[in-house]
Image (spheres, rainbow, N blue to C red):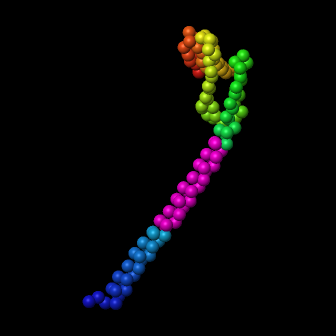
């Protein structure tokens, strides 16, 4: 059989392997806790960005009614924020006898960029120039 020295060495090897496995498991557990914290922080950051975005959108909703004989100028109150006016909804009612004319026109006074919506021979047209 095995002598005492061999048994001690065998148990010591098993103990060291167990210690190594325990250390690995502890490290994995700590890593998991850290990753969970990172994900939670990222979710909180995204929730804050969403709240800020929703707040900006509320400020940007600007319904406008005018009788058509007036000019309308839109200015971006948040020019430093990119993509603030990615969406613009324009709803207009055409007078019954209106068959030719410009319905909507907007331009950038510092460049040749412009957008025009009009009616020609009773049909709607859309033209734009990005500058």
User: Residue 42 colored magenta?
Assistant: yes
Residue 11 pos. (x, y %): 37, 83
Q: Is residue 26 left or right of residue 75?
A: left
Quarter residue 2 falls in: bottom left
Q: Residue at x 73, y 18 (%)?
A: 70
Instruction: Return the residue nearer the eye: 130 or 121.
Output: 121
Residue 105 pos. (x, y %): 64, 18
Q: Is residue 8 left or right of residue 96?
A: left
Q: Quadrant of the C terminus?
A: top right
The answer, for residue 103, to whether it is visible in the render is yes
Q: Residue at x 56, y 12 (%)?
A: 122
Q: Residue at x 52, y 66 (%)?
A: 30
Residue 123 pos. (x, y %): 54, 14
Q: Is residue 47 above or below residue 78?
A: below
The answer, for residue 131, to whether it is visible in the render is no
Residue bounds of the magenta highlight? 27-54
Q: Residue furthest right?
A: 70
Looking at the image, how many numbered discs can be counted on the residues?
0
Residue 1 pos. (x, y %): 26, 89
Instruction: Return the residue nearer the eye: 29 or 15.
Output: 29
User: Residue 59 colored magenta?
Assistant: no
Q: Is residue 12 above or below residue 130?
A: below
Q: Is residue 7 left or right of residue 85?
A: left
Instruction: Return the residue nearer the eye: 20 or 118.
Output: 118
Quarter residue 95 falls in: top right
Query: Most prominent secondary structure in the magenta stretch?
Result: helix
Instruction: Return the residue nearer the eye: 9 or 67.
Output: 67
Quarter residue 97 falls in: top right
Q: Residue furthest front?
A: 96
């Amino acid at each position: 059989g095995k002598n005492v020295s061999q048994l001690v060495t065998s148990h010591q090897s098993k103990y060291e392997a167990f210690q190594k496995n325990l250390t690995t498991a502890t490290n994995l557990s700590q890593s998991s806790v850290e990753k969970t914290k990172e994900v939670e922080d990222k979710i909180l950051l995204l929730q804050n960005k969403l709240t800020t975005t929703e707040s900006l959108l509320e400020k940007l909703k600007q319904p406008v009614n005018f009788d058509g004989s007036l000019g309308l100028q839109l200015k971006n109150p948040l020019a430093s924020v990119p993509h603030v006016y990615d969406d613009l909804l324009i709803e207009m009612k055409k007078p019954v006898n209106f068959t030719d004319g410009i319905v909507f026109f907007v331009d950038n006074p510092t460049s040749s960029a412009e957008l025009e919506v009009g009616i020609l021979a009773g049909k709607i047209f859309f033209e734009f120039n990005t500058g």
